[in-house]
Image (spheres, grey):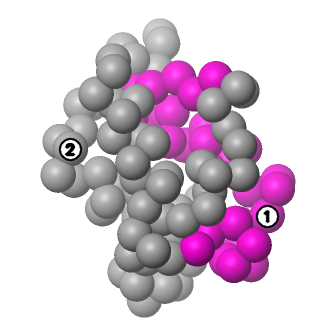
Amino acid sequence: MTAEEGAAPIAQADMREAMRDILADVLALKPATARGLRDETPLFGHLPELDSMAVASVLTEIEDRLGITIDDDEVDGDLFASFGALVAFARAKVAAR
């Protein structure tokens, strides 16, 4: 079964909440920390839980939950620069399915 077949579609309006849930689950963030994520919140280098090893786990969970495929060449420093950048990326990937 591919990621596209296994994941339920997600409404664009729910993308921020989905990203909060993914980051909270994968990084074991405290609920208050996850709720406090805003578009301008820096991620990589600012959330101690999000290190280079955790990035792969986050990407895999995004693929699984959103039913998308993230190619290696799409992953760069800008992707995890801020919560808003990650949400925008996920929205674009879901819209392009």
Task: Give how far across and how far down residue 29 sits, in percent.
Answer: 56, 77
For the C terminus, the quadrant is top left
Residue at the disc numbered 1: 51
Residue at 28% over, 28% down = 95
- Residue type at the position of mark 2: Gln
Residue at the disc numbered 2: 12
> In the drawing, does residue 36 fall left or right of residue 63?
left
Tag 1 secondary structure: loop
**Label 1 packing within 10 angstroms: few (<14), some (14-19), many (20+):** some
- Residue type at the position of mark 1: Asp
Q: Is residue 14 above or below residue 34?
A: above
Residue at 61% over, 42% down = 59
Regarding residue 22, the answer to whether it shows in the image is: no
Tag 2 secondary structure: helix
Q: Which segment is the magenta one?
A: 42-71
State the residue in front, 23 or 42. 42
